[in-house]
Every structure is written in structure tokens, then in C-alpha cells.
Amino acid sequence: MILLNKTAGVFPKSSKRKIYEFLRSFTFHPRKLFLHKVVLGIETSCDDTAAAVVDDNGHVLGEAIHSQTEVHLKTGGIIPPVAQQLHRENIQRIVQEALCASQVPPSELSAIATTIKPGLALSLGVGLSFSLQLADQLKKPFIPIHHMEAHALTIRLTNNVEFPFLVLLISGGHCLLALVQGVSDFLLLGKSLDIAPGDMLDKVARRLSLIKHPECSTMSGGKAIEHLAKQGNKLCFDLKPPMDRAKNCDFSFTGLQNIVDKIIMQKEKEEGIEMGQILSSAADIAAAVQHTTACHIAKRTHRAILFCQRKGLLSQTNAVLVASGGVASNLYIRKALEMVTNVTQCTLLCPPPRLCTDNGIMIAWNGIERLRAGLGILHNTEGVRYEPKCPLGVDISKEVGKAAIKVPQLKMQI
Ligand code: KG4
Ligand code: ZN
């Protein structure tokens, strides 16, 4: 746990005056009386500076986002001090844009909700410091948000989903399966023992130099792999899904990444090209790695559904699997998940892509959920800290492993 260092200033105290001027810049008058609860959500846990204003009917009144993806693509990964600096440069403008778009005067906000865990320390600090000063000036309640809980509950903004439901969160920084039983009541069924699938796909894309590929130069690694895979043959390489013998719901992607690295090295030798040039077999490699990733994710999810069904943890008539996170926008992986939900009589739901990735809306919505449930609303922010590492819910992954559920083989013909 890291204390928010107010004097060293992630968002320095001297900026108090700036916040005051910032608030005075809101000259518009309310178009309507705000009978609804309205929350401003702020997200800076990784490389997106995002803000949104959402009401308790789930209406998104305003939103703004500044993505750092392009900068980090060029440096080959996120450099935390660079991310911090970019958050500092953009947070005020982004919050202002979200508020202006919403036409909600800051004085009418019901609360300010901000991601305080988990995430990059330097990034979390900027959002928290800014938000605390804003809440202090406006004399509004502050709602600390767990980034993963916010991802998990986003589906309740777009769909009428009751508790409990199962959630699969797969992105560049996250990989977990959890049962959502309430706004702040989660059972963790499994997680990645090493890196997240998006991180692995980003590394493979970087090793294949896809940034130099004319069709992929502006895409994230995962998106580039999905795009190229359509032109490739997944059967050219025999990649085995990781952890096939472990009958739990944990994931692993480092081994797969190492095997793919070796294949790329071998192919570079065969094709007589240098590292950094594009292989003629790049599309086949992309197809094989995407297929293996999909099979691994589908199998762990299948076991999680069977576990919950056996233990009576999911609705018998209306069981729901929610898939979210950047990697869940991959249509091949979604099809693999659909095959699993079809055989287990579950419904697969995915938030729209802009809500799958990091955004301010999910943070504001989590604030609304917490306001409604009366959970974690702070009127005194003394001692509020950010927490770079923070597990989600109660970890029952050992119990899941002990149940050793055998998953029927599915023919992944996608
Ligand atoms: O949720 P997100 O925006 O940020 C976090 O990591 O929290 O997810 C970004 C990750 C990156 O690793 C990116 O390569 C991956 O999601 N991604 C994809 C696709 N689009 C983004 N992976 C596979 N297929 C995609 N279409
Ligand atoms: Zn995220």
C-alpha cells in the first residue's frame, strides 16, 4: 500500500488555485432541475485519462477520454513516469470536457467517484489527487472505486442483469473469472498466474513488428493479431493450450509467449530475415496464437460455469456470462465463448467495445451503484490512499481447483 504523498504532489497542492479557477470557468446555467443522482467518474489507473457524468437512470450525460496508446506504442510499452506526465497534462481538460458536455454544473453533482485501485501507482495518484481537491472545493462526497469491480458491473448500465452473474475480464492488465453476487460482493474463481492475454498478444505483435505492417500500424497488438489472423492458417503451427492438465480456472500466457518467440526465431532463420522485418508467415502465427488463446480462455470459462452450476451459484433459468476488457472485443474469442455458453445454456453478454476498454463511464456508473446501495460513500477523505495492488473479492480459486471438474472437449471450429 502506498500513501498518497500530498507534499511531493502527484497533482501538487499548488494546483488548488488551478482547481478553483477551473470551477469558476463553468459559466453555463442548468438546462433543467437535476432530480436524479448524478455522479462524475474519473479514471487514471493505467494509460487512459477518462471522465464521465452518469445519472441514476444509466444515462451518460457527458464523457471525455484521452488515450495514451499512440505514445506507448512508439516506446514499446507503458513507461509509468510518461503515463503520469500525460495524465497530469490532460486530466483537467478531460474532466472539464465531460462536465461541459453533460451540462451539469459541478454544484449539482451528487458525488465524485474515482479509481483508487488497482493500477499503476503514478497514474492512480494523479486521478486521486485531482479528485480529492475537486471534492474538497465542491464539498461533495467522494466514492473510491475498485477498477475491476467497475469493469464487472458495467453490463448493468447497458443491460438489465440481476445478481448473481459470472464475469470474465480479459485485457492488457487483467485476466480473471469472478462471480458477481452484489455491488461489492465478488467471488474470485481464477486469475492469470503470470501475464494477461492482452499483454501476451501485445508482446507477440511487437516481436512480429506488426507496427511496421501497413494494415496494422495504428492498431493495438491484440487488434493487429485479430486483423492478421483472418488472412492466416491457424493449423500451420501446433500450439497446445496452456495448463491443460490443471483442473482449475487459473490462466497462464507466459509459456505460450515463449513458444511463439521460439517459432518466430526459427521462421526468421528459415526465411533468412533479420529481427524487425515482417515474416511471410506472420498471419499464420497470428492465427495460431489467437486460436490457442481462445481455446485456453474458453476452457477455463467453461469450467467456471460448470463449477457455479454444480454449487447452485448461478440462476438455473437465466445464467449469464459477461465478457469484458479489451481482449473481449476480439470476435474470434467471443465466438469461442459463445460455443461454451451454448452448451451450458448460459447467455453471453458483452458491453459495447467503448465500455469494454478503460473509460470514465464505468467509474461513474460504479459510483451510482454504490450510492444506490449506500456503500463506500466518504464525506471525509482524510487518509484516503491509492492501492496499486488489490485483489478482487474473496478468492475461492483453491476450492475450484479441488473440485477438479473435467470439461467436455468442444470442437473449436470457428
Ligand atoms: O481494457 P484495455 O483497453 O486496457 C487494459 O489493459 O486495461 O485493453 C487493452 C488490451 C491490449 O493488450 C490490446 O492489445 C487488447 O486489449 N486488445 C485486443 C483487441 N483489442 C484490444 N486483444 C485482442 N483482440 C482485439 N481485437
Ligand atoms: Zn481496465
Image (spheres, rainbow, N blue to C red):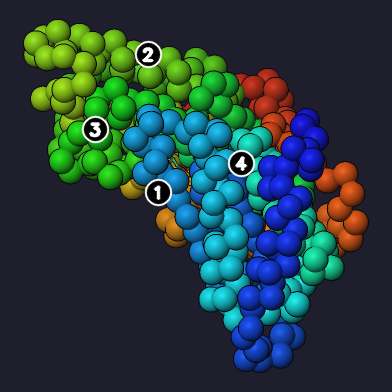
Residue at label 3? 210
- Asked whether disc 1 touches disc 4, contact meaning CB atoms under 8 Å apart, the reply is no
Residue 95 versus residue 287: which sits nearer the camera? 95
List the residue tagged with mark 1: 329
Tell whether 25 sits left or right of 384: left
Circle 4 sits on which residue? Answer: 123
Q: Distance between the residues labelled 1 and 4?
A: 24 Å
Disc assigned to residue 8: none
**C-beta proximity under 8 Å, tags 1 and 2:** no
Q: In which quarter of the image is the C terminus?
A: top left
Q: Which residue is drawn at 43% across and 31% down?
A: 77
Image quarter in which the N terminus is found: top right
Residue 267, position in %: x, y?
17, 13
Label 2's element? Answer: helix
Q: Are marks 3 and 2 in contact (CB under 8 Å)?
A: no
- What residue type is disc 4 on? Ser
How many numbered marks are there? 4
Which circle's residue, 3 or 2, is located before the other in the chain? 3
Q: How crowded is mark 1: few (under 14 residues within 10 Å), some or many (20 or more)?
A: many
Numbered label attached to residue 258 = 2
